[in-house]
Image (tube, rainbow, N blue to C red):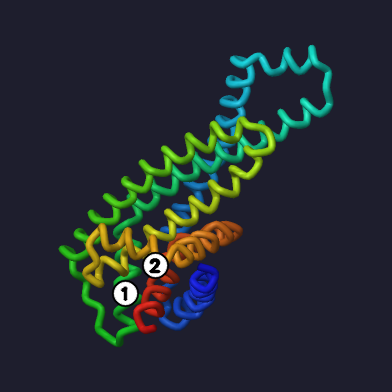
């Protein structure tokens, strides 16, 4: 898996050079600005609402009054850490829902970018085909909804696990890796669909090459330092990654 993560990470650097060489920035800037504005507004709302959820849970469980009665520094420390882990899990949960919203509404742009990237790599003239684009979008939306459903199940389990002192402290890392995997899977599927992979074959392929999906997702998260470029770079890097794997 480590080798596949390295391949996925290298593809992001190649994606930057590819975008510059073939002047694809016009397909990145406007969708990127829209994505950035939605992301910032969403995260402000998410962070505030996660505070409200934790306050509500704490009040229902009577944690504050119990801690004041016990007056134990260690207990206070454990519950502060548990609250932090739970907040991180909730933020990742909110971000996961936002991510699928973007994947669904942005699927026409992502499908087009993936098609154009593959056409350039294979030296073909790219011609816009509405029926193919519509088919790719419908397929990816379906897979995104499937992934979203499974992630909600897993994240609910992680929220419950985060309530357990010590054991719950690793839940943000598990949730982040899961986020990376499912996002990378969505990006890789555009190329796999054009290679005539069925949905089940695509799921099996990414299951065997988890590193490719995780690596793509990790760089997607890191690229949020410069939010505007994250989604478009992810889909181009994913297309380059699949081309590498197919050629080996």
67 left or right of 132 in image? right
The residue at the point 67 percent across, 36 percent down is 84
Q: Is residue 34 above or below residue 82?
A: below
- Of the two numbered discs 1 and 2 on the same chain, state the one appearing first in sequence: 2
The residue at the point 49 percent across, 51 percent down is 178
The residue at the point 60 percent across, 49 percent down is 173
Indicate the quadrant where residue 76 lies: top right
Q: Is residue 22 visible?
A: yes
Q: CA distance from mark 1 to mark 2?
A: 11 Å
150 left or right of 93 in image? left
Are the residues at dot 1 and dot 2 in contact (C-beta closer than 8 Å)? yes
The residue identified by callout 1 is 116
**In the rendering, which numbered label is found on residue 16?**
none
Residue 196 position, x and y percent, is 21, 69
The residue at the point 73 percent across, 14 percent down is 66
Indicate the quadrant where residue 52 lies: top right
Q: Is residue 37 above or below residue 112?
A: above
Foreground residue among 58 and 205: 205
Foreground residue among 113 and 196: 196
Foreground residue among 153 and 25: 153
Q: Residues within 10 Å of mark 2 (few under 14, many from 20)?
A: some
Residue 83 position, x and y percent, is 66, 31
Q: Secondary structure at mark 1?
A: helix
Residue 160 position, x and y percent, is 54, 31
Indicate the quadrant where residue 44 lies: top right
Q: Quadrant of the C terminus?
A: bottom left
Q: Residues within 10 Å of mark 1 (few under 14, many from 20)?
A: many
Residue 224 position, x and y percent, is 56, 57
Name, please, the residue furthest toward the left: 131
**In the rendering, which numbered label is found on residue 27?**
2
How many marks the image carries: the answer is 2
């Amino acid at each position: 898996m480590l080798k596949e993560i390295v391949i996925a990470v290298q593809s992001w650097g190649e994606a930057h050079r590819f975008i510059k060489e073939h002047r694809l920035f016009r397909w990145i800037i406007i969708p990127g600005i829209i994505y950035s504005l939605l992301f910032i507004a969403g995260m402000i709302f998410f962070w505030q609402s996660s505070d409200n959820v934790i306050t509500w849970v704490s009040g229902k469980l009577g944690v504050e009054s119990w801690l004041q009665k016990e007056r134990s520094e260690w207990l206070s420390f454990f519950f502060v850490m548990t609250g932090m882990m739970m907040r991180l899990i909730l933020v990742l949960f909110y971000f996961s829902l936002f991510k699928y919203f973007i994947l669904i509404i942005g699927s026409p742009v992502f499908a087009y970018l993936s098609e154009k990237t593959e056409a350039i790599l294979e030296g073909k003239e790219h011609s816009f085909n509405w029926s193919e684009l519509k088919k790719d979008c419908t397929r990816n939306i379906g897979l995104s909804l499937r992934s979203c459903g499974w992630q909600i199940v897993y994240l609910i389990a992680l929220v419950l696990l985060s309530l357990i002192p010590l054991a719950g402290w690793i839940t943000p890392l598990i949730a982040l890796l899961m986020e990376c995997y499912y996002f990378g899977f969505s990006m890789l599927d555009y190329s796999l669909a054009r290679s005539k992979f069925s949905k089940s074959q695509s799921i099996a392929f990414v299951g065997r090459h988890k590193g490719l999906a995780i690596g793509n997702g990790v760089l997607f998260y890191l690229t949020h330092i410069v939010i505007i470029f994250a989604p478009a770079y992810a889909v181009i890097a994913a297309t380059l990654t699949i081309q590498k794997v197919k050629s080996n």
